[in-house]
Image (cartoon, helix red, strand yellow):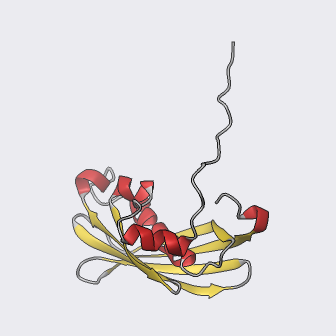
Amino acid sequence: MTTTAPPPQKSETPVIHPREWFARVMAGELPHPPIARLVGIRMIRAEDGVAVAELQADPERHGNPMGTMHGGVLCDLADLAMGTAVGSILERGESFTTLELKANYFKPVWNALLTANARIVKRTRTICYIECDVVDDKQSLVARLASTCMILRGDMAAGR
């Protein structure tokens, strides 16, 4: 006999506007998102299309088989910063989703405090293009990432 899992249920938690969410996270009223807690990312600031996030790289926690930091963890760090930058400029009733993410890696990382500096390059009514530089504690460029997001409104934004 085959059984199927029930469809996922939408959260009963009220949707908070991204700007309000970030302010409440920074005030300690709400936790960082689950992925940030899992990986160890801390959001530092977000306003007017700019966001900064930090991560203490640890090869025991974030290492790939070669012993350097896994590129996916760098993507998580930058993606959170870029998403928060987009969230900082959304109007009430708007949300977004990522359409594309691109990463260029410039140097390996073992132990370093990494800072992701995200900034919106261009926003139209429906598309937002964001870039993010990840630097180490010596301000040396580790990676540059870019993302394209679609701005959602109305039914498309509901529950996101």
**At 44% from the left edge and 62% from the top edge, which residue is drawn?**
76
Could you tell me if residue 65 is visible in this image? yes
**At 64% from the left edge and 40% from the top edge, which residue is drawn?**
8
Quick one: 80 or 110, which is closer to the camera? 80
Tally of numbered discs:
0
Quick one: 145 or 21, which is closer to the camera? 21
Query: Where's the C terminus, which quadrant?
Result: bottom right
Q: Quadrant of residue 134?
A: bottom left
The image position of residue 121, as x and y in percent, is 57, 87
Quick one: 147 or 154, which is closer to the camera? 154
Q: In which quarter of the image is residue 52?
A: bottom left
**137 with respect to 31 (left or right):** left
The image position of residue 25, as x and y in percent, is 41, 67
**At 25% from the left edge and 71% from the top edge, which residue is drawn?**
113
The image position of residue 9, as x and y in percent, is 65, 42
**At 23% from the left edge and 69% from the top edge, which residue is drawn?**
112
- Placement of 8 over or under 2, stated as above or below: below
Q: Given the current orientation, which residue lies at the most extreme top position?
A: 1
Query: Where's the N terminus, which quadrant?
Result: top right
Q: Quadrant of residue 124?
A: bottom right
**91 with respect to 142 (left or right):** right
Q: Given the current orientation, which residue lies at the most extreme right position?
A: 155
The image position of residue 144, as x and y in percent, is 45, 77
Could you tell me if residue 118 is visible in this image? no
